[in-house]
Image (tube, grey):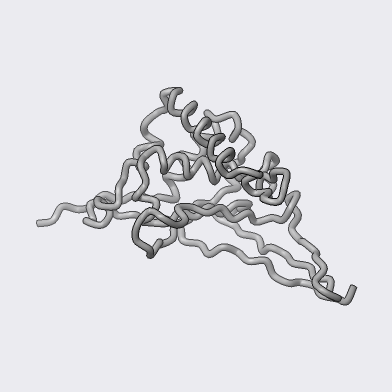
Amino acid sequence: MKGSSASIDFSAELDTLTRELCRRIPELGHIDPDRLLFSIARSRAEGTHGTYARIAPLRFAGGAREHTRRRGPWRETFRLPELHHQQREIYYLITIFIPRFLRLSFEQKLSTIVHELYHISETCDGDIRRFAGRNFAHGSSRTAYNRIIKQLVDRYLAGNPPESPLTFLHLDEISWQQQHVHISGITTPVPRARLVARSRS
């Protein structure tokens, strides 16, 4: 008789870990975990190249619900729909791609999560952290951005954090493929901005 496989709710585990990270890493202390929702999605491509995780801010610059732009002779206004989960409004949807995420090492998994959390604006208003320059998401140098993430992760691990919120990061793709572990979690499509007004400027 086959033994029953363990089950891991990735969305719940990520929520627990995020609350731990926000308590222990001052640079993430501004984040309200109740405004975050973690989703899982299937990655199709083989190998480790590609996206491991993605954050979708659910507000425009400065936390605005609407954004107006000029397009040729038109003035267009877009609005992002609200997303709610368990009676709380969500400002950020973070999606983890399985199994590509599982192919990373423990520290790479942790760094990926911290990387996405660091994108959250300093006011946690639904916008992302904006750097000066053209590439406002990562700043003028992605290498410099990644260096910040490494420093945060190294400092966190050096502080002897409890193992319990980190245990699920040791899960690898082989265990999942061989059905030793069943992964569950929330699956939520990214809300898209909708055109709500259009007029000639």
Left or right for 117, reference 96:
right
- Residue in the image at 31% along x and 45% along y: 171
Establish if 198 lies above or below 22: below
Which quarter of the figure is the C terminus placed in? bottom right
Left or right for 160, reference 63:
left
Which quarter of the figure is the N terminus placed in? bottom left
Query: Who is closer to the viewer here, 47 or 102?
Result: 47
Left or right for 5, reference 66:
left
Query: Who is closer to the viewer here, 37 or 151?
Result: 151
- Residue in the image at 76% along x and 72% along y: 196
Q: Locate residue 112, reporting x and y percent.
A: 47, 44
Left or right for 144, reference 41:
right
Q: Locate residue 19, reporting x and y percent.
A: 51, 37
Q: Residue furthest left?
A: 1
Residue 86 seen in this snapshot: no
Quarter of the image for residue 13 reads top left
Q: Total of numbered circles in the picture?
A: 0
Q: Locate residue 181, reporting x and y percent.
A: 27, 51
Q: Residue furthest right?
A: 201
- Residue in the image at 21% along x and 56% along y: 178
Establish if 3 lies above or below 159: below
Establish if 45 lies above or below 144: below
Query: Who is closer to the viewer here, 145 or 125?
Result: 145
Residue 63 seen in this snapshot: yes
Q: Locate residue 194, reporting x and y percent.
A: 69, 70
